[in-house]
Image (cartoon, grey):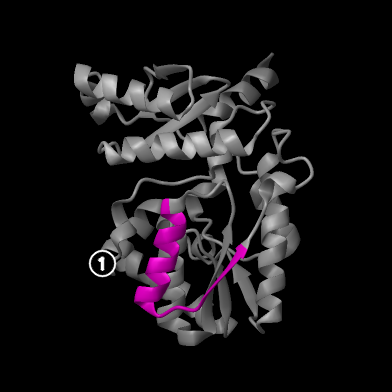
Amino acid sequence: MDELQNKYEQLKKGLLALGSVAVAFSAGVDSTFLLKAAHDTLGDNAIAITAEHSALTLRERDDAVRFCREQNVRRIGFEFDCLSVEGFSENPPDRCYVCKKAIFGKIAEIARANGVAAAADGTNADDAGERRPGMRALAELGIISPLRDAGLTKADIRALSKKLGLATWDRPSGACLATRVPYGEKITAKKLAMIGDAEEALLNLGFRGTRVRCHGDIARIEVENADFDRMLDPAIRSAVSEKLKEIGFLYVSLDLEGYKTGSLDRALDKEKTG
């Protein structure tokens, strides 16, 4: 706990040195903790900026608005059409770079216009070991990552979030809805809406750590191992299949390996190994 507290103090020290900061806020585990720490440290000199786009769920938008209202944090939201960004819809392997370069370019612009010293994102110390092309865009734009710089891992952030009374402390990790579409398969507003609606339906049925991967007209559901038996219950299975077909999928399948972060990256790994 001493080590954890030391990391937290290091985070606050770094934020204090900035004088003011704009946090790219998605209402996820990392950005919520960062915004809370920034606001506790800098008061009104810490603001939230949220890109409101079709790859962000309505639940996430509502959570962002609610949290900032409850914490009395100034929030600036801006409409962002990710589908209009050149190269995004084609869904290349570096799609995240293309998207983040556009989104964070706008966030940095808004931060400057509001006299804020720095724009920050919620990248943590664990993210360095994952395939994240978007991090290159952050570096090019001068976006800082205070959680990573303080050495805070996802487990650290969850522990500190719980200590601070944040409801997000045990929330499953989130990601842009575009990550559910295999590279090379065109991303459309309809697909993003179907994915969002399907995952919301699973959440409403009590499935927390889930992904609905969109393979054309096939929905490939990933659930945590602890939820397998429940998903295979005939009544639940029927309800899930019926709902996802109602949403627009022609076929509904369950991935036997369960939920895996970045599972669609396997196709890229396979190409590298031949």
Front residue (pair 259, 239): 239
Residue 164 image position (x, y, % from top left): 28, 70
Relative to 136, residue 75 above or below: below
Residue at 69% x, 44% y: name it: 83
Residue 191 visible (yes or no): yes
Residue at 70% x, 58% y: name it: 139
Furthest residue toward top: 274
Residue 10 visible (yes or no): no
Relative to 168, residue 87 above or below: above
Front residue (pair 264, 247): 247
Furthest residue toward front: 246
Quadrant of residue 156 within the rendered picture: bottom left
Left or right: where does residue 103 sit relative to residue 22?
Answer: right
- Residue holding disc 1: 163
Mark 1 Cα-neighbour bin, 10 Å: few <14, some 14–19, many ≥20: few
Would you say residue 73 sits in the magenta stretch? yes
Would you say residue 15 sits in the magenta stretch? no
Quadrant in the picture for the C terminus: top right
Total labels: the figure holds 1
Residue at 58% x, 35% y: name it: 190
Front residue (pair 147, 203): 203
Residue at 56% x, 27% y: name it: 264
Residue 89 image position (x, y, % from top left): 71, 37
> Which range of residues does the magenta coloring cover?
59-78
Left or right: where does residue 210 sit relative to residue 78?
Answer: left
SS of the residue under disc 1:
helix
Residue 37 image position (x, y, % from top left): 42, 73
Q: Amino acid at mark 1?
A: Lys
Relative to 34, residue 239 above or below: above
Quadrant in the picture for the N terminus: bottom left
Magenta highlight: main SS: helix
Residue 141 image position (x, y, % from top left): 73, 62
